[in-house]
Image: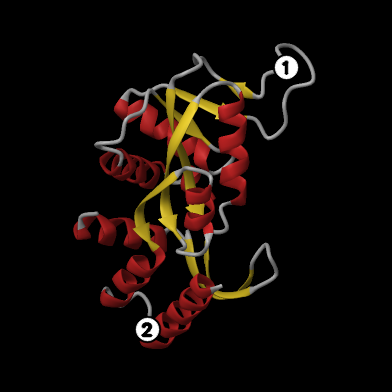
Amino acid sequence: MNQIVVREIGEMLFRIGAVRFGRFTLKDGRESPFYLDLRILVSHPDGLARVARAMLQRAEGLAYDRLAGIPYAGLPIAVAMSLIGLRPVVYPRKEAKGYGTGRAVEGEYAAGERVLVVDDVVTSGGAKIEAVEALRAVGLVVEDILVVVDRQEPGSRVMADAGVRLHSVLGVVELLESLRRSNHIGEDEFRRSSNFVAGAARG
């Protein structure tokens, strides 16, 4: 990705508090020196639009008929991309409806169409695979997933095993390096965070 775009996105995420430094307990119980919370983008329309444009730029060259946003963080990003790029959106429900249509995937689509799955961050990849399986179960073709930030943990390997290619606007190491160069974080924060990423990648 263009380094200017990486810097702009990284600085915007830091400014709105979508990337924070300190001591944070992750979902799997690990303690991390930084935390990514891109759900906050919904409260920052300018930032959301900037991310959507970067995502569309990153998606150039990928073949897809529709965007598929993963609830909850990926859905507003996919809708913003849709409004800017004029691409239709579908999304897999967290749970299939027990009434009405009983749909597991909302929106208009036809079996055999190719969807580009959209989300905010990838870590372990487990939630992404669940969404991919739901989309494939209704006949949609899923070969690519696009996220804003790749935490560069085992998620990419998990998705490769499921036959899905991972694409991202920026990797977490790029994000950390950009914030260090712009003096938003110091050497100590950069080193602690980089060491954590390296350890997670080995795991």
Q: In this rendering, would 186 be left or right of 140? A: left
Q: In the depicted view, which residue is nearer to us: 157 or 1?
A: 157
Between the C-alphas of marks 2 and 1, the distance is 51 Å
| Residue 160 vs residue 40, the one in the foreground | 160
Name the quadrant of the N terminus. bottom left
In the rendered view of the protein, which quadrant contains the C terminus?
bottom right
Q: Residue at x 49, y 14 (%)?
A: 110
Where residue 196 appears, as percent x and y from the top left, is 51, 78
Q: Is residue 50 above or below residue 83?
A: below
Q: Quarter-wise, where is residue 61 in the image?
A: top left
Is residue 80 visible from the viewing direction of this image? yes
Q: Which residue is mark 1?
A: 102
State if disc 1 and disc 2 touch (CB < 8 Å): no
Residue found farthest to the right: 98
**Mark 1 Cα-neighbour bin, 10 Å: few <14, some 14–19, many ≥20:** few
Residue type at the position of mark 1: Gly
The quarter of the displayed image where residue 4 is located: bottom left
Q: Secondary structure at mark 1?
A: loop
The residue sitting at 33% across, 42% down in the picture is 55
State whether residue 178 is above or below residue 171: below
Q: Is residue 71 at all visible to an observer of this figure? A: no
Residue 54 picture location, percent across and down: 29, 45
Q: Mark 2 vs mark 1: which is more N-terminal?
A: 1
Please tell me whether mark 2 sits on a helix, a strand or a loop.
Answer: loop
Labels in figure, total? 2
Q: Residues within 10 Å of mark 2 (few under 14, many from 20)?
A: few
In-image side of 96 versus 11 (left or right):
right
Asked if residue 67 is positioned above or below residue 107 in the image, the reply reads below
The label number, if any, that marks residue 151 in the structure image: none
Residue 186 marker: 2
